[in-house]
Amino acid sequence: MIVVEGLRVRFGRTVALDGIELCLEEGITGLFGPNGSGKSTLLRAVAGLVSPSQGSITFEGAPVAPSQEAWRRLVGYAGHESGLYPNLTVSENLELFGRLYGSDSERPASLLSQLGLEGRSGTQAGELSAGLKRRAAVARALVGEPRLLLLDEPYANLDDDSAALVSEALVAWREPGRSALVATHGAKKLKAFADAGVILRRGRVVTQGRYRDPSHRRRPFHETAAP
Amino acid sequence: MTEAGFVTKTMWLAAKDLRIELRARDTLAPMLGFAATVALVLAFALPEASSGNVGVVAYVQAGFMWVTVLFAGLIGFGRTFEVERAEGALDSLLLVPVDRSALFVSKALSNLAFIVVLEMVLLPLSALLFAYDLGGSWGALVAVVALVDLGFVAVGTLYAALAAQTRSRELLLPLLALPALVPVFIAALELTADLLLGAGFDAVAARGWFGILVAFDVVFVTAGVLLFDAVLD
């Protein structure tokens, strides 16, 4: 669905992404790699929040066009920060973004329930703990029922139970025709249900591929990858 | 649920900004505090009107009022995108399926609301402190104020978006906006002084400054709508 070719992103003298070649098919793809490997920049570039200095990103054969509403309607993104308005309640945040995306009016409440946030719906987002904020950020990214989901460290600051809720929400979201790219250091959590994986190092793809067999997911990704 | 149109989405976004301000009170409070303090201090600096200096006093009164609105407004415009920066909400906003000009119009509407509230406090306060004698010209003053506000808000919102992309945004906003706003505030000063000297709406509307104000509004509102996308990128 998403094809990245020769993607290069520079910030001044720093080369954040150095000729990324990537084919993202439907399903959930884990994006792994050490700090500074370019995971967040790749997510931002695919979302259209960072302009590449070179290369191209296409979605179903057409170049990604962040300036077009039609493209933005397809994308759900949650970055390092929550992307929520701190002075609005969790519920108000989700309702606002849900309305802007034209989602079903029951979608925010359903996501709050799915991510275990019903009891916090009336709490202002700025008053949430880091873990609750992370879950609310995932809910916000999902509220528009995106076809392309881009998540940066969705498991950060989450305990095991909370991480399980996020995983369940991602599995519930997964449908034919939808793709997700999820950057995480919590590789074990994601590998339990991911369809594919990509490993980055120093702005380059080290390896990528789909898991051939669910039983292989417990093993290190590169052993099962078919580059 | 069917997706809403441009106007509805714009109103939702503007309402969001106003709701946040009602809770946080971190834009209007400094604007009003600044304006009230400046008006009070300047009231002591104003020369008393006598038969020989009525014209001078009218210009000084108009100048005091508009300089106060200008700098109090810049305080508010400087915070236009702070609400989006707090938790990285700007990224979320940039990705919502809404025409980018709706973002400009919604931000301009919320800024306009802040400026109108400021003027609703400042104008009566100034009338009291500076003993304005507008006679029956209050309606004409409201028309002039509306035209000034439109241009002021269009420029302030556009440059606030530009400055928000930089690290030195607090410095950059006045540096960019003040030179652009000079024609608006000279026109505001001239037309308000005329009203204070007893001119009616027809006389004010016939002045060249009125035409300049209208032209400025058209140019900068159009520029804001058309350029906002490029500015945010």
Image: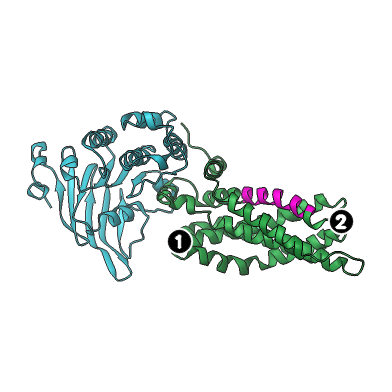
The residue segment tinted magenta is B112-128
Say left or right for B113 vs B144.
left
Q: Which chain is green?
A: B
A227 inside magenta stretch: no
The answer to if B127 sits in the magenta stretch is: yes
Give the x, y percent position of residue B211.
75, 62
> Which amino acid, mark 2?
Gly
Residue at numbered disc 2: B200
Earlier residue among tags 2 and 1: 1
Q: Are marks 2 and 1 in contact (CB under 8 Å)?
A: no
* Drawn side of residue B233 relative to residue B6, left or right: left
Residue B195 found in image quarter? bottom right
Q: Secondary structure at mark 1?
A: loop
| Secondary structure at numbered mark 2 | loop
* Figure label count: 2
Can you see residue B217?
Answer: no
Front-lying residue, B220 or A95: A95
Disc number for residue A34: none
Residue B111 percent coordinates (x, y): 60, 51
Magenta-colored segment: predominant secondary structure: helix
